[in-house]
Image: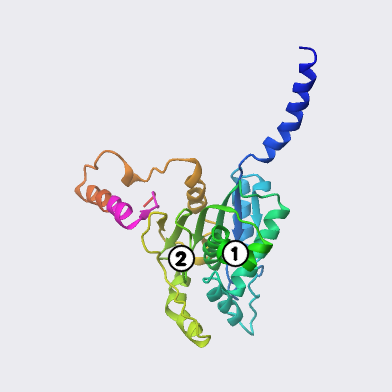
Amino acid sequence: MSRLFPMAMVLVLTVAPVAEAQTKRRVFVLHSGMHIILAHPDPNSAGLSLKKQLVGRGINNRDIILLDSPFPRASFKEMVPRAGLILYLESADPASGFAQDAYVRLDKTLKARGITANDDIVWIGHSAGGQIGMTMAHLAHHRKKFPALAKKTVGYRFDTVITLGTAYGANTTPADVKLRFYYSAGDTMIYFLSKHGDVVADSVKSKVRFRTLCKPAPNVLTRVFFDVEHPSWCHENRVIDCILNEFDKPRNAPWRRTHVEASCSMALGQLISRALEAELRISLEDRRR
């Protein structure tokens, strides 16, 4: 017995660090969108705001990764950089040079932070950052389709992609990754892109067409918010709360109550809201209105 005790202690001390290293983490990867002249001077402002909000709600700094925006900075000479719009278009195609380079940068950053395929990645992207997240999830789960990329990178497990005010060109999110599409009719930027983005796409012979809403799918849920303008997604408490509720708390929207409202109009509203979620994967999120 006296001989076994020291051996047991050595085994515990050896295995414990390995077990800790293999503990699954939930890592939030944040990405800002394209920079325009009306935005904050810092192209990473949206991601920085998200990080501040998450830290303020108890998320550990070690579990938050803010990626640098690859989009060119706007100026009074070029208020909406054409080069940025082209990158936005390319981000919808996993085979594009921009998308492949973005994954290489992501891989390098995740490796430096000790992130492995054992961890769950939650991508939160504002505007174009949401489209990039869909594409990064595709590449992470389908690297074998791109041999050159597979040779110099490793795969990661994307659990969820959350898009904030994203006009998207292609939903390439893998079927086993949850896509949460945060949408507001008050966001005028996505309408601008869906209406005028074709001009830029046609000029570079791109077939990408920006859209405002994702098609229904088992892994897709569109969350609809009232009156959120494009720059406000990363500051709205109700939006940040909703993001964290994706993982930690049951959702209790009024229309999910088990009892039927006494008012005929409210009861009809409950029925319509439940039908929207069940049939079209659209969830109405504002509880205060």
Q: Position of residue 216 (x, y in %)?
A: 36, 60
Query: How many numbered marks have been drawn onto this rendered protein structure?
Result: 2
253 left or right of 93 in image? left
Helix, strand or loop at disc 1?
Answer: loop
- Taking 5 as reference, is 211 above or below it? below
Give the residue type at disc 1. Answer: Ser
CA gap between label 2 and label 1 equals: 18 Å
Q: Which residues are magenta?
A: 273-287
In front of the other: label 2 or label 1? 2
- Taking 230 as reference, is 281 above or below it? above
Q: Position of residue 31 (x, y in %)?
A: 60, 62
Say which residue label 1 marks.
Answer: 32
Residue in the foreground of this view, choosing between 139 and 78 = 139
Q: Which residue is at 65% across, 80% downward?
A: 75
Q: Which residue is at 51% across, 83% downward?
A: 200
**Dot 2 and dot 1 residues touching (CB under 8 Å):** no
Residue in the foreground of this view, choosing between 158 and 248 = 158
Say which residue label 2 marks.
Answer: 171
Q: Mark number for residue 283?
A: none
Sequence-wise, the earlier of marks 2 and 1 is 1
Whether residue 111 can be seen here: yes
Q: Residue 254 is drawn in which quadrant?
A: top left
Q: Position of residue 25 (x, y in %)?
A: 61, 44
Residue in the foreground of this view, choosing between 109 and 45 = 109
